[in-house]
Image (tube, rainbow, N blue to C red):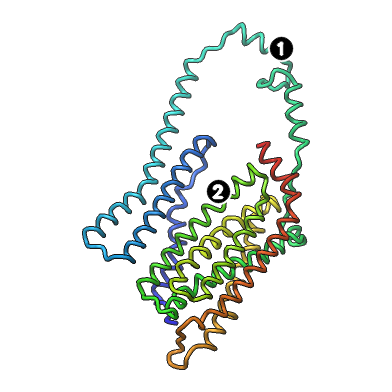
Amino acid sequence: MQRPPSTFLLLLALTPTTVSLVLMSLVRNYDTSTRDDKKHLNAFSSVALIIAAYLTILIILENITSLSLWARTATFTVLLILVASPLGIAIRAQREEYDRFAQALLEGSSYKPNPLMSSKFSSSRGPGNNPELPSDEGQAGDFSNDERLPVAQDMNLLQAVSTGNFWLLFIAIFCGLGSGLAAINNVSQIGESLGYTTFEINSLVSLWSIWNFLGRFGAGFVSDIFLHRRGWARPLFMAITLAVMTVGHIIVASGFSKNLYFGSVLVGIAYGSQWSLMPTISSEIFGVGHLGTIFNTIAIASPLGSYVCSVRVIGYIYDKTATDEGNKCFGTRCFMMSFMIMGAVAFIGFLVALVLFFRTRRFYETVVIKRLHHS
């Protein structure tokens, strides 16, 4: 495998840090309104989906036919407009915020309280009472209702590690994200061994990124709907994505014509879905008090699984089947056994996720869903 240039590695190392340092001064705390924020967030989501669909259509068209220079210019111009459109959403949101603030100032300056009603209200409430409530009974009622709600415990890392749910989620992530990342890392070599052209391989990599995005976006959205409306515990969707990934690995292992296009859709969507589900499940089961530490500890399963699947499975089998000339391998035999093994690994993750679902189903019914309905 050809090593990337040292300048490219330096660029990868410095760019994320530089961007964070340059833009960190723009981060501010703002008062938010859930109703208004949802409208603008939905607009951002719509733009992201439109861009993903647009790029997918362009990639497919470029594989079917060769676009002329003017067509490439026109499509690139449209893409720039779509990429810049979120700036317009942000500007409109900021303008609406300023308009609401100005309206609130005008209403505040024009409001003149009735002195008779004001004195009557002040005399009716004793010292220490809440002025927003007509009596102490309403306040006590709200407090007692909140007290009756079940509370999820905020575990620290040591407490979370000592539970079986932590290790079930860790193993599921090891099997799912590990095998999925191994497939992504080797898509170029798989395409080369199956006779795909360089242009087709580049298209596959681009499409894989789109499927990854759709999985991250869609899994959170779909699982939220079924959790709120049907009461389905979120680990069930982790099991579903692992089952989909199992099928995707088997399709890649089959080696039939254009199999990578079908397999990449399933594996890419399932891989992105697990990255969306894993932090949410961690916060719901272990609480948000130490979520950063717990989440990043569970996330260690991804590179560990990728190392085992990439180096100890794919790399080892590829080297065994490769010819002596340039250490190259061609044909379905190069990756068939590897992806059958990774399909088995993903299926084990599916079974583990099912166990996690049955273990936490009662917890979701008594704690998570009730508090969601209350909020």
Secondary structure beneath dot 1 equals helix
Position of residue 1 relative to residue 365, above or below, is below
Quadrant position of residue 136? top right
Residue lying furthest front in this view?
256
The mark lying in front, picked from 1 and 2, is 2
Residue 271 relative to residue 373: left or right = left
Q: Determine whether label 1 and label 2 are within 8 Å by CB.
A: no
Which sits in the foreground, 254 or 357?
254
Tell me the quarter of the image containing the C terminus.
top right
Tell me the quarter of the image containing the N terminus.
bottom left
Label count reads 2
Distance Cα–Cα, label 1 vs label 2: 48 Å
Q: Amino acid at mark 2?
A: Phe
Position of residue 254 relative to residue 294, above or below, is below
Residue 328 pos. (x, y %): 45, 87
Pointer 2: what residue?
221
Q: Residue at x 48, y 47 (%)?
A: 27
Residue 89 pos. (x, y %): 40, 41
Q: Which mark is on residue 124?
A: 1
Residue 182 relative to residue 103: left or right = right
Residue 161 pos. (x, y %): 74, 62
Quadrant position of residue 113? top right
- For label 1, count other residues whose C-alpha is less than 10 Å away and answer few (under 14), some (14-19) or many (20+): few
Residue 81 relative to residue 216: left or right = left
- For label 2, count other residues whose C-alpha is less than 10 Å away and answer few (under 14), some (14-19) or many (20+): few
